[in-house]
């Protein structure tokens, strides 16, 4: 996608925030918006690769905070770090190396938390 089309996830994220603030959307819509936002920020948002190589952190463009650049080894390096517990500290350093990747990571984390809250919202309304 060229131009502003590659930033569609930010529009979905703003709609998600407005949906939470106005309470006009049901839990299903909130969950769908949260899932779209999560997918965008972790797998489609423009960011830097940041995968560690011989020359330091990779400075190529990537899609999403959890995906690497066009180099095959970098494509799954961060995604594998999510699963391997011993690599979580390194993953945290790679998800916040600069402003663009940090914004994508923060947006993805907020979208995940929104999805969890939208699932729990009907339970909260009934009282425990």
Image (spheres, grey):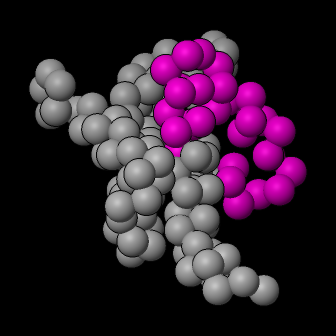
Pick the front one: 46 or 58: 46
Residue drawn at 55 percent across, 57 percent down: 114
Q: How many marks?
A: 0
| Residue that extends furthest to the right in the rendered view of this protein | 86
Q: Pick whichever, 50 or 29, lies toward us.
A: 29
33 above or below 2? below
Q: Please give the range of residues in magenta.
A: 81-108
Residue 28 x/y as whole percent:
39, 75
Q: Quadrant of the C terminus?
A: bottom right
Image coords of residue 67 (percent x, y): 48, 42
Residue sitting nearer the eye, 46 or 73: 46
Identity of the residue drawn at 68% across and 54% down: 82
Q: Provide residue 55's location: percent of width, then percent of height.
A: 63, 13
Quarter residue 24 falls in:
bottom left
Q: 7 above or below 125?
A: above
Q: Main secondary structure of the magenta part?
A: helix
> What residue do we see at 42% from left, 64% from top?
30
Q: Residue 6's image quarter?
A: top left
Quadrant where the N terminus sits is: top left
Residue 60 among magenta residues: no
75 left or right of 44 in image: right
In this rendering, would 32 be left or right of 127?
A: left
Is 97 colored magenta in this rendering?
yes
Residue 14 placement, left or right of 78: left
Image x and y of residue 25, in percent: 36, 64
Q: Is residue 52 visible?
A: no
What residue do we see at 28% from left, 38% from top?
11
Residue 110 can be seen in this image:
yes
């Amino acid at each position: 996608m060229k131009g502003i089309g590659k930033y569609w996830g930010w529009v979905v994220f703003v709609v998600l925030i407005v949906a939470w603030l106005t309470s006009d959307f049901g839990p299903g819509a909130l969950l769908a918006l949260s899932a779209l936002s999560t997918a965008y920020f972790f797998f489609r948002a423009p960011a830097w690769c940041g995968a560690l190589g011989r020359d330091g952190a990779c400075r190529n463009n990537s899609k999403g905070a959890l995906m690497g650049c066009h180099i095959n080894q970098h494509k799954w390096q961060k995604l594998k770090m999510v699963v391997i517990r011993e690599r979580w500290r390194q993953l945290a350093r790679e998800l916040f190396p600069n402003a663009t990747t940090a914004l994508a990571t923060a947006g993805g984390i907020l979208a995940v938390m929104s999805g969890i809250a939208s699932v729990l919202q009907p339970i909260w309304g009934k009282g425990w």
